[in-house]
Amino acid sequence: MAILSVSNSTIKVMNAALAELGVPPISSFTENSISARTGNAKFLDTLEGAISAYRWRFAQEVFTLQQSGDVQLPPDFHSAWRIPREAVAVHVAYANGRRVRWDVLGEDVIIEWPSQTTPAVTVEASAVKAPEGWPGHFRRYFIPLLAAELAMPITQDESRAVGLFQLAEQRFALAKSRDAQSRSPRRIDTGAFVRARRGGR
């Protein structure tokens, strides 16, 4: 499981979710209250799920992995590499810069690499980020999602939980659309193209 530092921004997100439930805010996850205890239990798990649900741009990182020992590998795979704790979803694996066939086995990425040499293995993965690093569209999705997860333990209000989950689903669709719009295609250098054509005359 990833580790998330508890900052003021984390508490603000938690309190925004509590406000959706009509529940007073907390000042710390260590308070002796049902809201604080439930938030402490639910916040990181809910965040990991939200980040794993889609390949958000803000959450993307490249990790260099360390090789794991004593891992029983399935056929056609040759080595295992430990996934960092902050990585919650692996998308692509590379060995010596080459894209390779891979899978996840427990806490490891396993790769197909029949060469006798030990490669340098990296992965593109989604990583847990603190709230100060979130774009607005993700924050607007996450707050009702967290509120929905908190609703039953704190308020015992099933209808409110269902309504918040439905709102979170709507916000998820909007957030994915906004995230996709921000993935600008690489601009073509038309000036360089024209210069190259002129140079060839």
Image: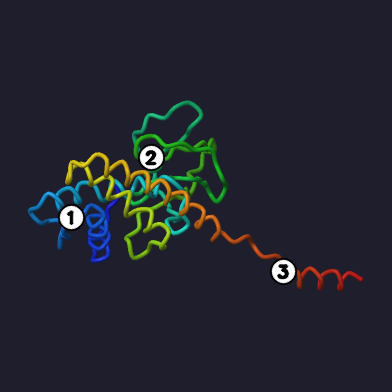
Identify the image quadrant of the C terminus. bottom right
Q: How far apart, in angstroms, are the residues tagged by discs 2 and 1?
A: 40 Å
Q: Relative to the observer, which residue lies in front, 199 or 128? A: 128
Rendering quarter of residue 79: top left
Residue 12 in sight: yes
SS type, badge 1: loop
Reading the image, the residue beneath label 2 is: 108
Q: Residue at x 35, y 45 (%)?
A: 49
With respect to residue 200, does 35 lie above or below?
A: above
Q: In the rendered structure, find residue 189 and report the number of the disc placed on it.
A: 3
Residue at image coords 81%, 71%? 194
Mark positioned earlier in the residue sequence (2 or 3): 2
Q: Which residue is mark 1?
A: 23
Which is closer to the viewer, label 2 or label 1? 1
168 vs 188: above or below: above
Cα gap from disc 3 to disc 1, whole angstroms: 54 Å
Most extreme residue toward the right, as rendered?
201
From the viewer's side, name the closer residue of 4 and 141. 141
